[in-house]
Image (spheres, rainbow, N blue to C red):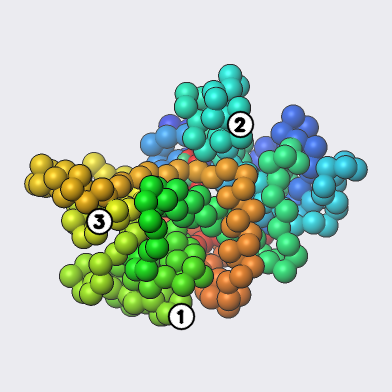
Amino acid sequence: MRAMTVTPGKSDSARVGEVSEPPETDGSVLVTGLLTGICGTDIELVSGAFGSGRAGSDHLVIGHESLGRVLDAPVGSGFAAGDLVAGVVRRPDPEPCPACARGEWDFCRNGRYTERGIKEMDGYGAEQWRVDPYFAVPVPAALGLLGVLVEPASILTKAWEQVDRVGARSWYGPEQVLVTGAGPIGLLAALIASQRGYGVHVLDRIEDGPKPELVRALGGTYLTDLRELDVVPDVVIEATGVGQLVFDCAELLPPAGVICLAGIHPGPASVDVRLDALVRQLVVRNAALVGTVNAGKRHYADAVDVLLAADRTWLERLVTRTVPLSDWPSALVREPDDIKVVVDLQG
Ligand code: BGC
């Protein structure tokens, strides 16, 4: 069968590969792959910057943002032929560490976790894949192909949970939220902020294309310069990973403000910052910077709820390009109005 393959550690190795049928050890639920989303992690995998294949394999099937239709599932698995399904990315480490042992693989302590399509496990970018029912997320038929957004949305439901938990150190009632970066992660962060009734402000370098209108459709303001921000943000969701911007946002935080770092930048970049002054400011304001990666099972379920509650037309506008599997490497080449590019695994 055909799959999206790369050779880990080797740049420009993205291929339409021929691979064997998914092994039963991947799980008892057999799935027809429908769509997989492309994100910055895939671009880094293809650059050879990181990623690793299954033991003994010289290639890796990538694709961790998944949507498929169940072909076959055992009775009692909770799934039946025809159901839409998305797969969880991470698997607990084999030890397991205390966090993985209680299902918090997104907080794995020893780094020996594995990830579908990223680290030591083949991903979901194939005509067929298998998944263990425990790591399969039911996608309501009402979401249809928008179910491909469940994994990226899970990154944000986890991020918002982190913000809430840090916020709950003291009285917590955020009103204004700044999101930096209007890619899929930033826009989904803004969607959740608007669903919660917060004032939404999104910063991005891009001045035209679909992004400004998508932010305005959420009732938010779209900024291309941080100096245009006319409120004090109680929460910042930082989705660019650009060091200078993180420092600039940290300076804006009010007492007990929270910045959640949800993105990384390929870098390396160096910035001159008045670090002592910044430390003083964070300390005297009880401000917090918290990083977040990956998602646990409940965050996927929360992501489904967020997407179901969203305006369908708005979500459809996030998916700006669909590329057939036969030409999937072209999904890696950025086009000006791209937000989320997806690969049609039957195309
Ligand atoms: C994925 C996460 C994963 C991370 C690091 C992200 O793109 O969404 O699930 O943990 O990459 O590998």
Label number found at residue 217: 1
Instruction: Give the x, y percent position of residue 110.
Output: 47, 23
What residue is drawn where x is 90% and y is 43%? 75
What residue is drawn where x is 37% and y is 51%? 170
Q: Quadrant of the C terminus?
A: bottom right
Q: Is residue 183 left or right of residue 296?
A: left
Q: Is residue 96 visible?
A: yes
User: Judging from the image, what secondary structure is the residue with disc 3 in?
Assistant: loop
Pick whichever of labels 1 and 3 is earlier in the sequence.
1
Instruction: Give the x, y percent position of residue 335.
Output: 41, 65
Instruction: Give the x, y percent position of residue 192.
Output: 49, 65
Instruction: Give the x, y percent position of residue 228.
Output: 21, 74
- Residue 200 appears in which quarter of the rendering? bottom left
> Which dot, 2 or 3, sits closer to the camera?
3
Q: Amino acid at mark 2?
A: Arg
Give the residue pinned by disc 2. Answer: 102
Density class for disc 3 (Cα within 10 Å; few <14, some 14-19, many ≥20) is: some
Label number found at residue 42: none
What residue is drawn where x is 70% and y is 66%? 144
Label number found at residue 255: 3
What residue is drawn where x is 47% and y is 27%? 109
> Which dot, 2 or 1, sits closer to the camera?
2
